[in-house]
Image (cartoon, rainbow, N blue to C red):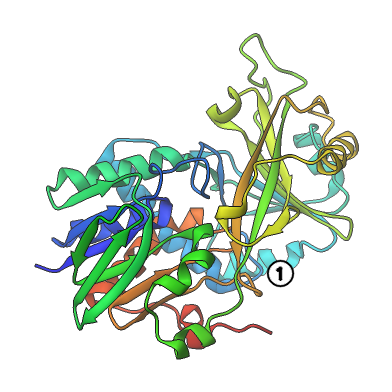
Amino acid sequence: MTHHIVIGAGLAGAAAAYSLTARGEDVTVLERHTPANDRGSSHGSARIFRYAYPDRLYTELVVRARELWDDLETKSETELITRTGALDFGDTRHTDLLAKIFEAVGVEYEILDPERAGERWPQFVFDTDVLWHPDAGVIDAETTVTTMLDRAMDTGRARVLTDWTVTEVARRSAGDFRVTSATGEVVEGDRVIVAAGGWLPALLGDLGLPQAFLDALPRFEVRQEQAFHMPYRDAGADGRPSTPWPTFIHKSGEMFTYGLPGGRDAGYAGQKFAQFNGGKVIGSALDQDGQITEEMRTRMIDYAKRNLPGLIPEPYAETTCLFTNTPNEDFVIDEVDGLVLVSACSGHGAKFAPLLGEFAADLATGAGSVPERFRVGGVSTS
């Protein structure tokens, strides 16, 4: 039986392990810290699940991913996505285009003018028409990682090694990899799947990849995003709102902002929101400092005062998270000489997690392929 080595125990790595073991494959997962740790991109309980993309391919992939989420929830008897619905608005969000794609793909939606939307969701100020789709929600990323890894290990075909920092991946021959850690430990296997997220730029030179493949890769940019939790104005004694809050994306010439119920990350007592790709650029996850800037804090407080009357504009919790971006925000998923690369996900990969696992397993086993534009030769850097 083929033995696969998965580097990274975030959403993509856990999904790959889950998919592979479900196919009867053996897996070793290597994680430099612990699964879903707060120095990566898969920690906490609040990631947006949405269908709205100005690109039909991604909406179609969300539909496919949703089926896999439902299957995982059923098999694990665990709720991983809380249905909240989602609002999209702003003069550069192009809700008319989103609606056309929803029509073509078959996603339920509604368009409301600002007045009607304000009556339904008085906790927002709307500056344009609003697209509402009710099947959106919030992903519990940490629980998802734990669930997928637990189910993989329950098969008896997977193990997870923590505090295991990869320093070299050596391909000795076809189907023969040797992975070495910073402490000199070695794991050998037939295939390698790299799902390292923000750690990838620092790891690329140690993967033994062909130079032509490295040259064809798009430029990876890692950003340390800053997110803020602000309390609900109509909170009850437990801090939770009396009026349900959806997720939202507000994209205008001023700023691209997203938000969602903060979940248990901050005691369920507030909405988490941030400026998309507003954080500082760093070399890789190795360079993160976890710092919140006063400039960003002030910017988001001002935004809340103008646009979110349902919140008290005073952060009671703050956090950072890593985005690993390609120039056009497409994914990179490809295989070369027995090594599969599943990164970067450009800050919008969480909702696709189980599908990313299927893609990785397909490439590693030769059972299938991925959309051509995610392959290294198909990634546009224009």
In the rendered view, would you say 144 is above or below 168? above
On screen, residue 92 versus residue 200, left or right, reads: right
Q: Which of the 4 quarters of the picture holds residue 22? A: bottom left
In this view, the residue farthest toward the top is 237
Is residue 93 found left or right of 295 in the rendered image? left
From this viewpoint, is residue 123 visible?
A: yes
Q: Residue at horizontal 35%, vertical 67%?
A: 168
| Figure quadrant of the C terminus | bottom right
Rendering coords of residue 162 (x, y %): 32, 44
Q: Quadrant of the N terminus?
A: bottom left
Q: Position of residue 317 (x, y in %)?
A: 68, 28
User: Closer to the camera, 68 or 379?
Assistant: 379
Residue in the picture at 85% in, 45% down: 126
Residue at 36 percent across and 56 percent down: it is: 13
Tell me if residue 147 comes above or below residue 194 in the rendering: above
Residue type, label 1: Leu
Closer to the camera, 90 or 285? 285
Residue that lies at the very extreme toward the front in this rendered image: 184
Q: Is residue 344 visible?
A: no
With 132 as the anchor, is 335 left or right in this view?
Answer: left
Secondary structure of the residue carrying numbered label 1: helix
Q: Residues within 10 Å of mark 1 (few under 14, many from 20)?
A: some
Give the residue number, with chain letter if any, for mark 1: 97
Seen from the viewer's position, the closer of residues 357 and 291 is 291
Provide residue 271's location: percent of width, then percent of height.
68, 32
Q: Residue furthest left?
A: 1
Residue 160: x and y, percent?
26, 47
Front residue of this view, candidates 368 and 265: 265
How many labels were placed on the picture? 1
In the picture, residue 282 is in which quadrant? bottom right
